Image (cartoon, rainbow, N blue to C red):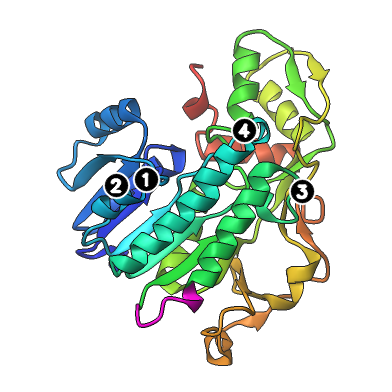
Amino acid sequence: MDMFDKKKILITGGTGSLGQALTKKILQSNVDSIRIYSRDEFKQTQMKSEFDDDRLRFLIGDIRDKSRLQRGMENIDIVIHAAALKHIGTAEYNPFEAVKTNIIGSQNLIDVCLDEKVETVLAVGTDKAVSPFNTYGATKLLMERLFVSANNYRGSHKTKFLSVRYGNVLGSRGSILPVFIDQIKDGKKITITDPEMTRFNITMEDALGLIMRALDTGKAGQVFIPKLKAYKVDTLKESLIELLNSNSETSIIGVRPGEKYHESLINEHELRITFETKQDYILFDEIVSQLKSDQKQDLQKANLQQEYSSDKVELLTKDELKQELLQHDLIKNNSNY
């Protein structure tokens, strides 16, 4: 990870699942320092004790607060923007709070990064931004657009803005895995919205790999999207029942407000601007004037004929999904079993 050699890094939302995983990963390099920027005092205290590394700095702050963000950004080389109001239900009932964090907060970050001459700024996006069906997705779509367009008005600044886009990480906070495990552990019925609902299969290791590839090879305005398999929600449930030797019953509760049946990472309108590598799809947005043909010379046009969604890719079998859960210690890390 030479890209972090002697660099100063700032991670917004650094106390979250992804932020902590990123911190652990980057600390394996010869990084100068990592600043954890978040609102959660308790989690920062926990994280400081757990990591116990002199290269870590902890800053209490909100991306809505531009002046605080400006102070925290001094002399930073690379920013990974993982802060967001991300729970779909919360955003549906508090839409303007989602706007203030995900849109206005992200624009604050862009402005401050330009002012402080940050080298690279990477935003962590979501599948919910593709043809958005809910408030959270709509705000994250606008966040992604802000990051793309920031490359057009950076002027003489050399700051590079780019993004990654993926779905819920299996086992992270907000994913269904810990919910299912807790329900099994407590002897409750397993609540499923719809057995036929599908989700892309992405682990934390996959997400970290995507971010590292984007930081290492990405160019201004690009959006990196991983090539993934998927699974049915019912297959995940059955896998857990077998692995945990459970006889839990199932309760079908129906789709929640703002929830999609299937995850989509590239819609049909984006196919014409999608290129690919062995591991990823890469979007070249046409509004970014810097994205000339010479930046595409090492890539090939993506061989996608339809929307890239979780119901249109290879689905993991129950045995394959069980192997994934065991290989990544996802049951152990999400339960007290």
Q: Residue at horizontal 66%, vertical 16%?
A: 245
Question: What range is drawn magenta here?
Answer: 151-157
Q: Pointer 4: what residue?
A: 94
Q: Residue at horizontal 51%, vertical 65%?
A: 147
Q: Secondary structure at mark 3?
A: loop
Q: Dot 3: few (<14), some (14–19), or many (≥20) neighbours within 10 Å?
A: many
Mark 1 or 3, nearer chain start: 1
* Callout 4 amino acid: Asn
Q: Pointer 3: what residue?
A: 315
Mark 4 or 2, nearer chain start: 2
Depth check: give the residue in front, 108 or 164: 108
Q: With 301 as the anchor, is 86 left or right in this view? A: left
Q: Pointer 2: what residue?
A: 68
Mark 3 or 4, nearer chain start: 4
Q: Residue at horizontal 48%, vertical 17%?
A: 336
Q: Secondary structure at mark 2?
A: helix
